[in-house]
Image: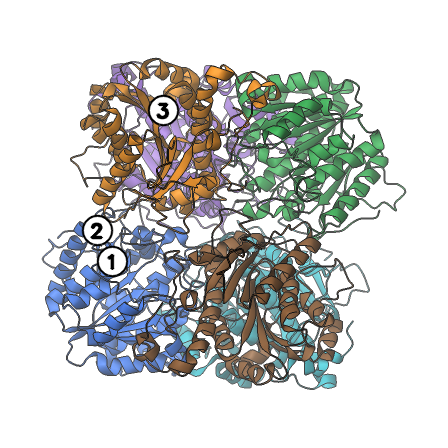
Chain colours: A brown, B cyan, C blue, D purple, E green, F orange
Amino acid sequence: MHHLGSLFGPDITFLGVDRLDMRDPRADPDVVILGAPLDGGTTHRPGTRFGPAAIRQACYLPHNGVRRSLALGVDPLTELRVHDAGDVPCYSGDLASAVRRIETAVRLVAGLGAIPVVLGGDHTIALPDMRGVARHHGFGRIAMIHFDAHADTGDVEAGPLYGHGKPMRQLIECGAVRGDRFFQIGLRGYYPEPETLRWMADQGMRSYDMSEITARGLDACLTEVFTTAMRDCDGVYLSVDVDVVDPGHAPGTGTPEPGGLTSRQLLDAVRRVAYELPVVGAEVVEVSPPYDHAEITAYLGSRIVLETLSGIARRRRDATDGPWDPHTPLLERPVHLAPTR
Amino acid sequence: MHHLGSLFGPDITFLGVDRLDMRDPRADPDVVILGAPLDGGTTHRPGTRFGPAAIRQACYLPHNGVRRSLALGVDPLTELRVHDAGDVPCYSGDLASAVRRIETAVRLVAGLGAIPVVLGGDHTIALPDMRGVARHHGFGRIAMIHFDAHADTGDVEAGPLYGHGKPMRQLIECGAVRGDRFFQIGLRGYYPEPETLRWMADQGMRSYDMSEITARGLDACLTEVFTTAMRDCDGVYLSVDVDVVDPGHAPGTGTPEPGGLTSRQLLDAVRRVAYELPVVGAEVVEVSPPYDHAEITAYLGSRIVLETLSGIARRRRDATDGPWDPHTPLLERPVHLAPTR
Amino acid sequence: MHHLGSLFGPDITFLGVDRLDMRDPRADPDVVILGAPLDGGTTHRPGTRFGPAAIRQACYLPHNGVRRSLALGVDPLTELRVHDAGDVPCYSGDLASAVRRIETAVRLVAGLGAIPVVLGGDHTIALPDMRGVARHHGFGRIAMIHFDAHADTGDVEAGPLYGHGKPMRQLIECGAVRGDRFFQIGLRGYYPEPETLRWMADQGMRSYDMSEITARGLDACLTEVFTTAMRDCDGVYLSVDVDVVDPGHAPGTGTPEPGGLTSRQLLDAVRRVAYELPVVGAEVVEVSPPYDHAEITAYLGSRIVLETLSGIARRRRDATDGPWDPHTPLLERPVHLAPTR
Amino acid sequence: MHHLGSLFGPDITFLGVDRLDMRDPRADPDVVILGAPLDGGTTHRPGTRFGPAAIRQACYLPHNGVRRSLALGVDPLTELRVHDAGDVPCYSGDLASAVRRIETAVRLVAGLGAIPVVLGGDHTIALPDMRGVARHHGFGRIAMIHFDAHADTGDVEAGPLYGHGKPMRQLIECGAVRGDRFFQIGLRGYYPEPETLRWMADQGMRSYDMSEITARGLDACLTEVFTTAMRDCDGVYLSVDVDVVDPGHAPGTGTPEPGGLTSRQLLDAVRRVAYELPVVGAEVVEVSPPYDHAEITAYLGSRIVLETLSGIARRRRDATDGPWDPHTPLLERPVHLAPTR
Amino acid sequence: MHHLGSLFGPDITFLGVDRLDMRDPRADPDVVILGAPLDGGTTHRPGTRFGPAAIRQACYLPHNGVRRSLALGVDPLTELRVHDAGDVPCYSGDLASAVRRIETAVRLVAGLGAIPVVLGGDHTIALPDMRGVARHHGFGRIAMIHFDAHADTGDVEAGPLYGHGKPMRQLIECGAVRGDRFFQIGLRGYYPEPETLRWMADQGMRSYDMSEITARGLDACLTEVFTTAMRDCDGVYLSVDVDVVDPGHAPGTGTPEPGGLTSRQLLDAVRRVAYELPVVGAEVVEVSPPYDHAEITAYLGSRIVLETLSGIARRRRDATDGPWDPHTPLLERPVHLAPTR
Amino acid sequence: MHHLGSLFGPDITFLGVDRLDMRDPRADPDVVILGAPLDGGTTHRPGTRFGPAAIRQACYLPHNGVRRSLALGVDPLTELRVHDAGDVPCYSGDLASAVRRIETAVRLVAGLGAIPVVLGGDHTIALPDMRGVARHHGFGRIAMIHFDAHADTGDVEAGPLYGHGKPMRQLIECGAVRGDRFFQIGLRGYYPEPETLRWMADQGMRSYDMSEITARGLDACLTEVFTTAMRDCDGVYLSVDVDVVDPGHAPGTGTPEPGGLTSRQLLDAVRRVAYELPVVGAEVVEVSPPYDHAEITAYLGSRIVLETLSGIARRRRDATDGPWDPHTPLLERPVHLAPTR
């Protein structure tokens, strides 16, 4: 797998990190960015095919492959070897082949010992993304933490074979993820129907809807997730559908559901996941630029990626720097005195 | 009153519920949706005439008259007989006749024993909406719970006879609602002038502005309202001006006032009202599509209606299902095991 | 300095307050609004040159120079003598001369005994704004409270002489503000680099990033600031970059950084500053109309100004009205019974 | 009638011309601008209430009351005494009173010997605008040249009394304009119904639809109009509905009909009318800012006004400068050598 | 085939015409509208899945199934029996099955003796649309008149099997249309490559690019087409890609190419085709609402349909009314005196 | 001068052409693209700093450095050696240094024997662009053909030293271009003042305003220009301000003036210039993405560049292919049979 290039527009990398060229024997990435520019699986508003390009370039800082987290004091793009392999060739009109190609690419990345971070595209890609990771790490060995307004556990028998309404069921049914290690955060609205909820309960899934999150607090819910996520699992896959955030903060998406998390809540939650658990794969999906305004959803997608990577990088620093505590004043955090690059 | 049809664009119903045909002797609705496509009463940005059409169709799910609340486990559109009677013929250039027609239509609906849910339109319609309800239930017998950034209690003597700045004063002055059963939530900004505030105090109104809500918490304020709302009253009318929400979450409105509730807060509050109190009428007003982006305000309007209806439907389930508690994990809530339809 | 007129579009004043004509010997303003329609200092999206015009007219109420704060019960535009001096002639293509002119104008206003309130424009203007104030009140005598997503303490040696990424360093380096009386609130993201953070720490700056604010609460952080801000200082300068607010609430800005304060949080915080501390100057910057939607960012800019002025006006009322307490129900707050104008 | 002020937003004048103060005995205007900020008469998309404010300020040049036509070499704002009387108090919710007030204001202006130029507002205002002019100049003495995609001759008996679909019939029925001196240019689409067309034919109206204009050429049609317009008439009233232009050039309007004139065609046609015929009144209507993009429709509205005034001013120069001929190279046109102001 | 319903949003018909219910033995349509809400075949910007819904409702007149052409004096929706069969179930993620279903539906309609008018959807649908027609009328018996900026004759071997860049080649290769009866109008830009152009030349295609159209005039080109189109053919299929029009007039499309026809030119051309030739099928494709502004492209799509139907209806009137001539003044055209309905 | 990189966003090249690396001794470009991302010289709406990035990537075809003109049958990006040198480091807040750097870069490119094509940026850059060319080819030896709505000949003494309103005067005053070899096309509106017009006449400039262009036809005017442009000159510089086009076709610009050319007219005119005259330099300026919609102005900018380059490439083919004639049917043009690359 050499560099995949770009499907839409110029061939750029996430914030200017290096391209991944698999033919280079020196390539030894920690993290590999992959684009999955797909919207054939959307049931309503399309446009997520332009998500990867938008997330890669939504920034007011130079595209120089350098980003130091102010809060955490680490630069994930340089402390980790983060490379961008380009876009998996996806054709929205032929989901079946797109799913195959994405799964192959993700599995290859995982096989390199790297963490794949897939930029969607619609949530159809969760199936090949996570299954690709599971093919390397073992079916049932990776827990899923899934931020979303929607359960995405639609009946596989009904309707087309692939789509953004059913990957989570497909992942459990094929055994890639255990139902009782599948955690959903942010559900709300008027979906899915009772049969599906009963199927979810039968699998032992744990789904935190916004009414529970509001009543108990997001941090309490996350802490509860974290205490069980790693039992009999070796790692965590993080799937973030940007529509978990309220449409006010993320209008550029296909199936907006009012009443979601704030951007702040999501970024903090993503950081906690990446800092407190061993993430082995991640995806940011459902950013739809045609419905965005002033690029705010694309920026949010960019920051979800960066916050994830920053958490991972800071986790690796714990041995030398000790635990990170946001109660410490920013300018007194010891990590800020550590050398960079 | 047969089906009223559509004033703007194709003749559709709220998310596909059945049309109400008054000539059908079998018609026995629990809830009747009415459109009031009016913006002649706006003092600034118009566009609310397109509010009913936008709220009726803002959804990414099929327009099939089925919506099951994930949190509450009820489907308000099927557990309640929800019908849509179409748009009251309103002409923005002649408010006086529009007000007459709306009041007649609302009173007819209330007379059927149904709960009218009116889709505005600008807030001028609160006068005929609530007065129409009061004509059936009795003047002074229905409490008002009013979410809004603005008090809408402008002096009736000043300026034109009708408009979106004065219906609340008109309702109290005509006796439809008692001043001391009039609860306002979310006020802020630089309005109204002191004379009006003194008038409001004289009526015994209880107005929670955002500074009090922030200091005490919205839930505490609502609980306080609920303890007194039903004293000597037989029901509650719920008036939701979408501008109670921050402009970031609801840009599509005419008189945006920064610093409002989040969408999440409003949806939770509306649900509490509908679940904890006997709602006999409701309205969602001031959704202005020309100023919306990516339909997010229209979606919010849709969800305010659905959350209201879901609360009503869940309230009716209490006898069989027991009280609803968001602390129960979603997939363990007993109501999810109950049969639907 | 007579009235300066308008650089872009018709010559209007902030919400209709009187123009300031310096040649009028009766002029004795408490507050002077100045426009600094500049975007030559932006490093990314421009458009802030239209900020002053947008902030001046973003309101659905009449432009009559009257605005009574609902929460505080004061009308800052009439209780204070608030005048608008127009736009300082700024040319975005020649920042050096713009900076000179702004500093001159601000110093003149301060010399009149008035509080300058500058409408930006990009944050480059913090240098002439605050330094102009300091030239009157004394270098090192005024504390800085700075709301922003970004530290704006970029190295003065690097790149162009002026710009919106470095005014805070310039202010400290020139001695206008003491580093240990410089308080920053709302920082986040991936900026600045470690060398700059070390420089900031060396100056004794106190920077509250969003991770600390989330962990401790904004009110606790502000209270901490307030206990030290006035030590050895005679007043406070308030600098509000609208991008401290989340892009969902303030899309119309040049360098949006997801995960910010809500509009409600900022307005409450600004009110606290102006009510609890002696503000001697203020600025609202980085409102960029071309990237705004439905004017929501312009409205927010308008309300930041009004909330600041309302806090100042209410502070002056304490002697007669006693302290303001948001726990008091709105319609029982004594100030609402006081005469206006 | 003193200066009327502004209904929406700050009180500004058309491109900075002087306000008209009727109490000033020295006032002797040639042209008076009036705003009619009304949209209560729109049958579909509203927003024209913001038309006057948008047209008044849509310009990238200083608002200094000076505009010299490049093509014609005259400055209509200074060669004519052009004053702006502000907005007629119009309330969209009460068209009947708005129509009365507009007619009174226009008649007053005409009574001063000035040419009223009314900025709409929806086309409802053609009734009071033109009738106000006719009340001064005599019923049936002024020909009408009407640019529009729609005939606006709807049956007066049907529907509400006033609205933007019927003023042209009302004008003929009341006798203000003779049917055989009523010229329509630019009609197209699927309106009105045959009964109305027969009524129009019966009145002797001459309506040029786009199929005739395309087949014969706009200039030929105009020339034909000009040869008969002044027979037994003393002047011409010019009514320009911006939707006569194709929606690509004028998206900001309420009832867009594809296939219209280009902006260039309309501006040339308006100039010909004003240069070749004695215009005694004019209106520019149906500019709807909420549906505009990048202000292009507002700019077009502004230029329609300026082109009209420039034509009038150049017509007055014919005696001294001779006829204007666009075949003469721009820099050789003698008028460019004439003194200005 | 009963009524197909709606894929996105409420189930509406084109401007309110009757639904087609195939089970009704009285159904005898002249024209059947079909939606093909598909964008899986787009190579760049998607969104055409919302084209059918947008075209069906883009109108400011009532959705009453009545539209009388002003220019032609016929009402195509009532003089012809125009019915709407709803949306063919298309899933963008599985083009192969969508293509099959569309072809089946179109063939069924043609088999009824009706003219299918398909609302796209992306241009992929030309293959099943035209082939479905040809299956009824005979392969090679129907000429194609194709308005487009792009030739859409991409190599079938390259890339995916279906897509909007190749249907025209597929139609010729399968024999549905003869290459020498394939007329293209409006080509421009930088596509396709020379091999494809040579293939096109080899087929005997006649492609009028914008340079030829500008040099010779559109009417002359059309007349030339008309003289040969019907040789050895029995009818004409009309395919209109809205991007043949300049992006200024039709921004809501996926592959905009500057320098196109004006809306006026296209509407006149479409009318000529439908009036002068025997149209047996038609499609309007590539209207993409997410990229539209103020609905202007949707309106254009609506008018392309109406102009086509009006031409067909007027052609049927020739026997009684004589030929239509736009040089006749509108109000003197005899057809306006003919009875309607 | 090695590759200059990107000032805003990722470092990309015009449609994927190769970067220019000056250190490569094999570099021998025919055409060099330069970005001048500047808006400090705009007098009204900014945003042109994002023009170069937008023009470089506005295309729905692959960014592969290949574009074959359909009309002309040449691929300018491969038949000419077109390279992209990146963005000249411009800081909008310091125009003086930006002007110096641009002039140096352009002169260097001209010194390589290549044609510089500069992507603006505001029109301020015409001064360093054209003067840089003149420094190589000789002052007074290159004619200027200038498409614009505005003369841009503002008095150099007034206001700031640099800006987009005065470069054309500066070019003549410094002698870079002879006044009588300066041709302006498309002027209109209300600018400039008579003194400036007299200065222009004194220089012998030939300015075609829209009234002359409409009266005589654009092609006749161009032909007239072409007959004199090369007298005593060695080449032509082509300056295209996108606002020469009507705002309907090019909304994304800073100073829109209704009544301009159509996109089609401009593209044809640009092609004529490049095909019929020896172009030695070109610029496309005033594309302002923040004010654009659906990228249509950026696309137009892209096509202006391509049409220019295509004309140049086709001119070089004349010797072998003979003259190009648009009257020849597209598929019969001989050039389509010629080999590419």
**Label 3: chain letter:** F
Q: Quadrant of residue E180?
A: top right
Q: Secondary structure at mark 1?
A: helix
**Residue F38 appears at what percent x and percent y?**
31, 44
Q: Secondary structure at mark 3?
A: strand
Please report the residue visible at 73 percent of the width from the left and 23 percent of the height from the top: E181
**Label 2: chain letter:** C
Classify mark 3: residues with Cα within 10 Å, few (<14), some (14-19) or many (20+).
Answer: many
Q: Which mark is residue E234?
A: none
Answer with left or right where residue B201 lies relative to residue C108: right
Type of the residue with mark 1: Thr
Q: Which mark is residue F279?
A: 3
**Which of labels 3 and 2 is toward the front?**
3
**Residue C100 appears at what percent x and percent y?**
15, 54
- Badges 3 and 1, same chain: no
Answer with left or right where residue A36 lies relative to residue E135: left
**Residue B132 appears at what percent x and percent y?**
61, 66
Please report the residue visible at 72 percent of the width from the left and 58 percent of the height from the top: B1
Of residues D147 and D212, which is closer to you in this image? D212
Classify mark 2: residues with Cα within 10 Å, few (<14), some (14-19) or many (20+).
Answer: many
The residue where tag 1 is placed is C124
The residue where tag 2 is placed is C95
Q: Quadrant of residue A175?
A: bottom right
